[in-house]
Image (cartoon, rainbow, N blue to C red):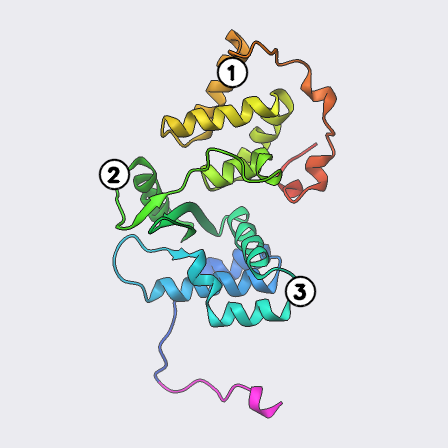
Amino acid sequence: MQGNSFKGFPPRVEVTPLPNVFFSQVLSLIDSLLELKTVMQIFFLLSRRRGYPRFVSFSELSHNAVIEKELYKMKGDADVLLRDALLSAVKHGILLHIPINVDEKSDDAYFINNQVEKNTIDKILSGTLKIPSVEIRSKEEPASEQSRDIYSLYERNIGMLTPILAEELQEAEHRYPPEWIEDAFREALRANVRNWKYINSILKRWEREGKKDGKPVGDTQKERDPDKYIRGKYGHMVRR
C-alpha cells in the first residue's frame, strides 16, 4: 500500500490551468470517474500542445497511460467504454467533437467547448482551415443497426449534439420514415453541408412535394414507441 501512495508535490511544480467554472459547474455534470479522468487528461494534453488547431484524438486518448489504467479496472470493451465517456462529455457540453480520418485511418478529434474552438471547428468543417493529413470523415452508409438511429447519424456525420437539437431530432424521427432521414443525411453530405437546418429543409421539401420513391410520410408517430426516447441513453436530453 505504501508503494501506491503519493509522496507530495515538489517545489516549483509545473501547473495545468483549469477554469474556475470547471469546479463550480462542470464537476457536478460528470457521471463517471472515467469521464472525469478523460476530460482532465484532455485539459492536460492541450495545455502542453503548441500550434493550431489544438485538439486531442481518440487514438491518442486510447493509449494514454492514466486512461488505460482506469479502463483496465473496468469490465467491457475498452474502446466502447472510452467512447461512451467521451460521448457523455460531449453531451454535457464539456467537449466538442468532429469525426476525422488521419492518414486515411478513422479517428475522432476532441476540443474544449469554448467559442474559440467552436470557430475553429466551423473553419474546419467549411474547408477554410486545412489540417495536414487530416480529413473530415463522412459515412455515407450506416455501419450497423445502431448507426441508423437519428442521434447516431447526427453525431457520426455532423458532431456536437445539444439538448435543443436532441428534441428537434426526436420530433423528426417521429415525423419521417427512417429511410427518408438516412437519405436526407446522405444528400447533405454529398452537398458538403453539415448542419441540421439543411437536412431538415430536405425532409420538409420531400414532405411538401413528395419524394422520388413516391412513398407518403404517413402517420409514423403511431408506429413508434414514444418511451424509447426516455429509456435510451439520450433520455435525459429529450422530453415526453
Q: Is 3 contained in the magenta span?
A: yes
Q: Contact, CB < 8 Å: mark 2 with mark 1? A: no
Q: Residues within 10 Å of mark 3 (few under 14, many from 20)?
A: few
Q: Which mark is residue 75?
A: 3
Can residue 18 be seen in this snapshot? Answer: no
Residue 82, horizontal then vertical, whole percent? 55, 58
Residue 87 in magenta stretch: no
Taking 116 as reference, is 23 left or right? Answer: right
Sequence-wise, the earlier of marks 2 and 3 is 3
Q: Residue at x 25, y 38 (%)?
A: 128
Q: Earlier in the sequence, mark 2 or mark 1?
A: 2
Q: Which residues are magenta?
A: 1-11
SS type, badge 3: loop
Which residue lies most toward the bottom here? Answer: 2
Disc 1 marks which residue? Answer: 204
Give the residue drawn at x 58%, y 55%: 80
Residue 26 locus on image (x, y percent): 53, 56
Q: Nearer the viewer, mark 1 or mark 3?
A: 3
**Few, some or many residues within 10 Å of mark 1 (<14, 14–19, 20+):** some
Q: Give the mark nearer the N terminus: 1 vs 3.
A: 3
- In this figure, which residue is indicated by the disc labeled 2? 128
Q: How many marks?
A: 3
On the question of residue 26 being in view, the answer is yes
